[in-house]
Amino acid sequence: TISITGGEIQFTENVRNIGIYNSGSGSIEIDGASISATDGFAIYNYQSGPVHIISGTITSTSSTALYNRMDGQVTIDSGTISGNYAIQNGNADSSTTGTITVGANAQLTGANVGIYNLSNSTQSVVVNGGTIEGTSVTGIYNYSNGTVTINSGEISSNNEGIRNGRIGAAYNPTAQLVVKGTNSSTIISGGTYGINNTSSRTSANGYSISIEGGTITGGTTSSSHAGIYNYRNGSINITGGNIEGYYGIHNQGTSTDGDGFVVGGTSQIIGTNSGIY
């Protein structure tokens, strides 16, 4: 077990370019400390060890701040995590089951991506509050067969608030996104799309979104903007929430695609051009 309850730890050069490297099943607990790395991961959780960040600052200047590679359970109560990617959960080469749980007082900022959920298997992310920003690409990228659940919190990007599904993947995705909470407690916003539910593979199927509440907004000034963009064989089920953009929902596919959506309940869809296109 590694328990760090204060102070400042900096890593500017080492063999692995890693701040804290947990190679097995041991646990890491951070409470009030500052962990930083210049060129590599500030925290690298390689296998199944649990990581608990009670408070503190985790920073990587040019890489991923916290990399949960395999089956670790990561809980973030509060604190600040920042890097090119604030968090990467899983890897493309293994079937893994790691979980990221984000608490109400956590602040995650990625210059590219806030949380990158990457796996052949069922890596999962649960957001119970806090703020998650992926400045240039997306707040949360669910490039996996796992589920991202948003119960509360604010997810944002200058590009896409959330991207769900695999682009260019060599196998079919079953990525799932569930958005819950109230319209004021769950906010997803992007400069182009609030949510991009997409895959570039015509044979892909199974990636899905369920919207039960929240406010989802995309850009409002261009035909490439939408609250939700659904491409190819993705499916959307909407029973609540507010969805806004140039198109509230842009549903795009070909004659061979099985994409579609169901809208009902207390949902409100607003488009400066069209509500549903």
Image (cartoon, rainbow, N blue to C red):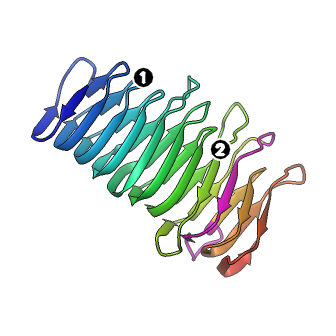
Along the line of sight, the residue nearer the viewer: 54 or 226: 54
Q: Residue at left 60%, top 45%?
A: 147
Q: In the rendered view, would you say 183 is above or below 98?
A: below
Quarter of the picture holding the C terminus: bottom right
Identity of the residue furthest to the right in this view: 255
* Residue 10 locus on image (x, y percent): 14, 34
Residue drawn at the location 67% of the way across and 59% of the way down:
210
Q: Nearer the viewer, residue 219 or 264?
A: 264
The residue at which mark 2 appears reads as 175
Report the residue at 13% width, 35% height from top. 9
Answer left or right for 162 relative to 115: right
Q: Which residue is mark 1?
A: 47
Kind of residue indicated by mark 1: Gln
| Location of residue 93 by image quarter | top right
Q: Quadrant of residue 167?
A: top right
Residue 117 x, y percent position in the rendering? 51, 41
- The first of marks 2 and 1 along the sequence is 1
Q: Which residues are magenta?
A: 202-227
